[in-house]
Image: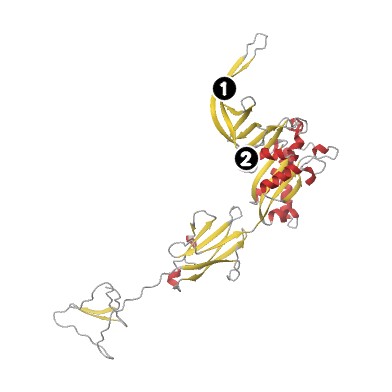
Amino acid sequence: MAGEGGNIVRNVFGKSYKEAEQIMKDASKGTLDFKSPQENTFYGKKGGKKFDEYQAKSETQSLLVKAVKCYEDIECTKEVKIIKKEVKYYFKAIQYSRTPTKSELKGLKWAIQYDDTPLANASQVTGEEKISYIVPKDRKISKLRVYAFFKAPDEKVRAEVSFKILDPIIIYICGYWNKKMPYAGSEWGEQYWGIGLKSSAKKYFRSTKEYFINGAGTKFSSGGDRYKQGKSFAEARLKNQASKFYQELFKEERRIMVVSHSMGGAFAEGVLSVFKNQKLNIEKVVHLSPADTSGFSVTFPQITYQIDIDWDPVLMYKNANDSSTIRGVKFSGISKNPKGDEFGHMYTKDEAFVWGWFEDLELIEFQFVNQENKTYTTPGSGMGYGGTSTTVLQKNFNALKVKSPTPFSRVYKNSKFYFYDEKTKKYYTEN
């Protein structure tokens, strides 16, 4: 039995009286019986007793959110579809299946979705008809979706916005240059870099936007000094909002690739340390023949690649007391100079085939073939001292997904060094 209201005003010896402005008894799914061993009496004015056909009570329409929009102003008058990170925007449920009561609005829920990741419920704003939201700068996403609902999110009822992202840019940071040594680079800007390498980089990154920085330092400067200079350079540009550097890199979000050569590697990592603090969108870092590798470390290990050439007369001098790779680098490769001359250091800033080595390093995979014991023997001195022998376990691999006809002499990847065997045309590791 449903629909009964009123207050019992007296209940004495089994007799009760109920009084209210209106009382309705509605047996919506069965019979309504009045039983008494004596009589049922009905009193009424304005016509007295009234009998009529039963009319079912109409069901309340389900309450649904029908539309949600994003606005740039708190008054919610300026709708937007493109937004910026680190800026507050307002999301409002603007249409319902019927007018909700104040009580029903207390059950209004919200959920946030980045790209195609799972929805995250925003329980802290339950009951709010309008919410604000700021996307953090370090979130690498292309779309934001905001849902408003009472029971469950509806894929069709959401505010979907994308982000304002400028065209990608490649930052080139040169090494030592000298007008008297053209093969080293007679200028520090665009002229320092070869057309073949730049064309390949643009194609890879799908970018035509370039920015050039002089990262040379003095001829005898250390890697640590140039790292500090690069950091100071970027910090100064960050403070100067009128500078081209600030306008191109700090003001708006964009994809960034950094390419350095020789002594520019240390300077580049100093710049990258500031980029990291500012949470810029760095996609790739490529160091070509980096110099003074022990004087600095990589800022983004998971996306940083080091390429060297053999032989390189410049680095034979500059890196004589340094490690073969930059501290913290996870991906490095060295290939033989296909031209076989003494200008290898110049080629790593000029030639398209060098950029091909970077792409191979990024994609190369090693397929295990077999393993064998290898014995290395050191002959005796001939002065009464015998030789020595050492046995190591050698694992052999095929290289997959490489395009360059020039194989790597050595690759560092998967926390291992892989060496190339000219005879077997395979790579190997040793314990």
Q: How many neighbours does mark 1 have within 10 angstroms: few (below 14), some (14-19), or many (20 or more)? A: few
Mark 1 and mark 2 in contact? Answer it, CB < 8 Å. no
Q: Which amino acid type is marked by label 2? A: Glu
Q: Residue 51, relative to residue 250: is it above or below?
A: below
Inter-mark Cα distance, 1 to 2: 29 Å
Q: How many neighbours does mark 2 have within 10 angstroms: few (below 14), some (14-19), or many (20 or more)? A: some
Q: Residue furthest top?
A: 384
Question: Which residue position holds label 1?
Answer: 392
> Residue 110, image x and y in percent?
49, 62
Q: Is residue 242 left or right of residue 143?
A: right
Question: Which residue position holds label 2?
Answer: 362
The numbered mark, 1 or 2, whose residue comes first in the sequence reads: 2
In this rendering, which labeled residue sits more in front, label 1 or label 2? 2
Q: Secondary structure at mark 1?
A: strand
Q: What sort of colour scheme is used for the picture? A: secondary structure
Q: Is residue 89 left or right of residue 166?
A: left
| Residue nearest the viewer, comparing 48 with 246 | 48
Question: The C terminus lies in which quarter of the figure?
Answer: top right
> Residue 50, image x and y in percent?
26, 86
> Which image quadrant for residue 400?
top right
> Which image quadrant for residue 71?
bottom right
Q: Is residue 273 visible?
A: no
Q: Secondary structure at mark 2?
A: helix
> Residue 294, image x and y in percent?
69, 35
